[in-house]
Image (tube, rainbow, N blue to C red):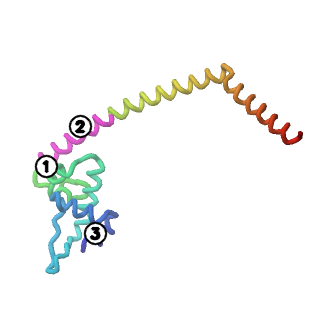
Amino acid sequence: MRIGELARATGTTTRALRYYEEHGLLHPERSPNGYRTYPPDAVKVVENIRLLLAAGLTTEDLRLLGTCLRDEVIGGHRCDDPTAKVEVFEQRLAVIQHRIDELTAVRAQLLARLEDLHGRQAVTRSNGCARQVSERKRVKGAKDDQKTFS
């Protein structure tokens, strides 16, 4: 399979595939005319690469996973050194959990500020500010009507 075919089969770009190759994640063969050719299991490799990059792993992490990228979403059956792979995943999970904790704290702050703003909005309405605005609109409308009928 050539690079364009692999890109279509995986929903990615040829540039992304070249990037994965540059980082040692894909290993295409070269045909006599210089075209990259990929084995059938390259589809699974690219799917795993994209999944794991989206999960927060780096290309360096993925390079360390080696043969695991060919397995069913890292099933572990063909991994040559499971201990190293476990360490990579544990480190990434710790980073992801830290990021989740940070985002949860930011979310709580935003919710508190939003609640505060809703409270201020209710106080403003009860002080009559909203009523004054609507009365101004009516007065302005009345002036417009007077101009029309004069």
Horizontally, is 143 left or right of 43 in the view?
right
Residue 133: x %, y % from top left = 70, 29
Horizontally, is 99 left or right of 21 in the view?
right
Circle 2 residue: 94
Q: Which residue is painted at 26% across and 57% down in the image?
A: 48
The residue nearer to you, when weighing 142 against 90, is 142
- Which element type, helix, strand or loop, lies under badge 2? helix
Which quadrant would residue 50 be assigned to in this image? Answer: bottom left
Q: Which residue is painted at 15% across and 42% down in the image?
A: 87
Circle 1 residue: 82
Amino acid type, mark 3 = Leu
Instruction: Name the main secondary structure of what is drawn in magenta.
Output: helix
Q: Which residue is painted at 25% across and 58% down in the image?
A: 72
Which quadrant would residue 124 be assigned to in this image? Answer: top right
* Label 1, label 3: how far apart the Cα atoms are: 28 Å
* Label 2, label 3: how far apart the Cα atoms are: 33 Å
Residue 80: x %, y % from top left = 10, 55
- Label 1 with label 3: CB-CB less than 8 Å: no
The residue carrying pointer 2 sits among few (fewer than 14), some (14 to 19) or many (20 or more) residues within 10 Å by Cα, namely few
Q: Is residue 56 magenta?
A: no
Circle 3 residue: 6
Dot label at residue 10? none
- Which element type, helix, strand or loop, lies under badge 1? helix
Q: Residue furthest right?
A: 150
Number of marks in the image? 3
Which is more foreground, mark 2 or mark 3? 3
- Which element type, helix, strand or loop, lies under badge 3? helix
Horizontally, is 79 left or right of 54 in the view?
left
